Image (spheres, grey):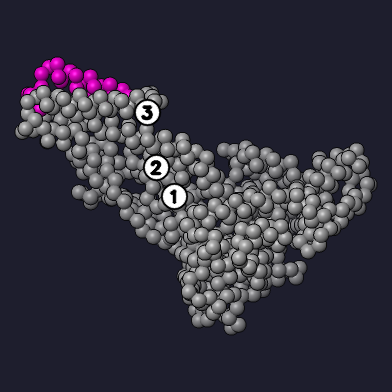
Amino acid sequence: MGIKYEGRAIGIDLGTTYSCVAVWLENHNRVEIIYNDQGNKTTPSFVAFTDDQRLIGDAAKNQAATNPVNTVFDAKRLIGRKFSDSVVQKDMMLWPFKVIAGVNDKLMINVQYKGQEKHFCAEEISSMVLTKMREVAETYLMSPVKNAVIINEPTAAAIAYGFDKRGDCDGKQNILVFDLGGGTFDVSILTMKGDVFEVKATSGNTHLGGEDFDSRMVNYFVEEFKKKNKVDISGNPKSLRRLRTACERAKRTLSFAFVTTVEVDSLFQGIDFCSLITRARFEEMNMDLFNECMKTVESCLSDSKIQMSDIDDIVLVGGSSRIPKVQDLLQDLFPKKVLYKSINPDEAVAYGAALQAAVLSKGFKNVPNLVLQDVTPLSLGIAVDVDHVMGVVIPRNTTVPLRKTKGYATGCDNGVVSIRVYEGERARALDNNLLGSFKLSCRPGAPRGTPLEVCFSINENGILTVSAKEISSGNMNQITINNEKERLSTFEINKMIEEAERYRMEDKEFLRKAKVMNDLDYCVYKVKNALKKKDVNLNLSRGEREKINNATTLATNLLHENNKQQKIDVVEDHLKELEIMLEKLVVNTGIENKHKSSFLGYLFN
């Protein structure tokens, strides 16, 4: 997050496990990381509740072992998830604090605060951490902080890289940002040319990071303690918190040592715990997670349409990117590249966010004139009237800001057109996320097929405006969608992308059937219109009219909602039979020379 205001510009990295804040120093032409009140550059993303106060940051984490059930962490990775989510149900076994289901299955965190039971959603906990980071900045700057803008974490890290390497880059550079933090994992591929940064593709996993590696170690040592002492500590929050702290410390040590000790005095019932763990054992228990990271890198490369050999630099971000095995696997993917480690991985996001805030603020003379071009994480499109197909207007990973117009047509006569706006990758509109809807009044007497012009516009802050205009009358309406309410979280975005891949064949079959049903519906509409013409009706016998009516009735029945499950081959066969029958009937009317072309135009144009 970048924050701008008169005279100052700061950047905040709201992390899952640790947060960081930086400021642009105009007089020194550089970014500085701000120390918190404990003299640390990073602040634990912990919030604790006691009988008399609320604690945030170091103070909250320091008392976690004595007050585990009321000390909340990992809040960021809970945003966007429901209580019934299988991931949440699994993680609840590891959290000492209590999580319950709120209204509409919303995940709520239950704590005791000042002698009362309180419920907080994950967004509220994260906002408390964000408030703490703002206070850290305000104490240092001795002035208030306001006017925030949002920036993607890997993009912020890429800006930090670009500033660090300014003057050393000639021509275009393709950068891969590998951001493996405490609770989330992000990959972005950007192209940098001078001061212009263009995001080509993004991918990630909101439930993969250092916390997961810690959990593997905790589970491993819980089982070891159980075997040695015949005691199970998995239900004791205080013991688990102390063991987790020791495991986190061991994980950090294994980044520069091959073996370390996990030691906790009086872990449970007065029993001391001490055990060795090697780097090889740590790597073995987490290898599937490390491999998952590499798959995400390959997926992002595929989306970006950039070859591995064309990547110029791999920028490491996030504390977990220090893990030697992770770096080895990355090096195997890019054998001819040297991993870029000049930027502190814990500080890169805050550093880049402060730079971007300075760019957006007014009055700075020395800040580089950076231009950031981000991308849409999901495809954006519409469905018109009763159409069930998602009509993509802006494909996923399209550079923004932008404005794009596409032509559509009304689906009924004399109607008010209903336009629904979606984001997602599924072929069927209902399988995507509905962002909003609006109606457009057509001119009186406007027939089905009246052309519409639909325009999607996304500004630099990610605000989406969708407008529709009936071309003949100029009638127009629009809807504006912001980032805060309707749009999906990062977790939900990644989930939708995964679902789209899993249901690719099902979507292909749906599109095939939808096309046939639309063709049949349009054919019936044209036939009925044609039969209203006098010159056509006069040249048809009663029997011929009956055959046409029977054919259209049969087709209408197939189009009915109750018959939508009919096999596609059956629908295709009826469409072909209807077209052949009508072709013969046109010939049999004896008007083929004079009226056949216009009659078929009525039917099929």
On the image, numbered disc 1 is attached to which residue? 379
In this rendering, would 386 be left or right of 501?
left
Front residue (pair 444, 199): 199
Amino acid type at image mark 1: Ser
Sequence-first tag of 2 and 3: 2
Q: Are marks 1 and 2 in contact (CB under 8 Å)?
A: yes
**Quadrant where the N terminus is found in the figure:** bottom right
Left or right of 146 on screen, residue 515: left
| Magenta range | 534-561
Mark 3 belongs to which amino acid?
Answer: Ile
Any mark on residue 388, and which? Answer: none
Mark 1: which secondary structure? loop
Q: Amino acid at mark 2?
A: Met
Q: Residue furthest front?
A: 336
Specify the farthest residue to the bottom: 27
In whole angstroms, how far apart are the C-alphas of marks 1 and 2?
10 Å
Tell me where residue 12 sits by quadrant. Answer: bottom right
Residue tagged by mark 3?
A: 568
On the image, the x and y values in percent for residue 326 come to 68, 57
Looking at the image, can residue 124 be seen?
A: no
Q: Position of residue 2 (x, y in %)?
A: 56, 66
Name the residue carrying label 2.
390
> Does residue 204 sit above or below 419 in this rendering?
below
Task: Identify the residue shown where x is 53% and y is 56%.
Answer: 301
Outermost residue, left direction?
594
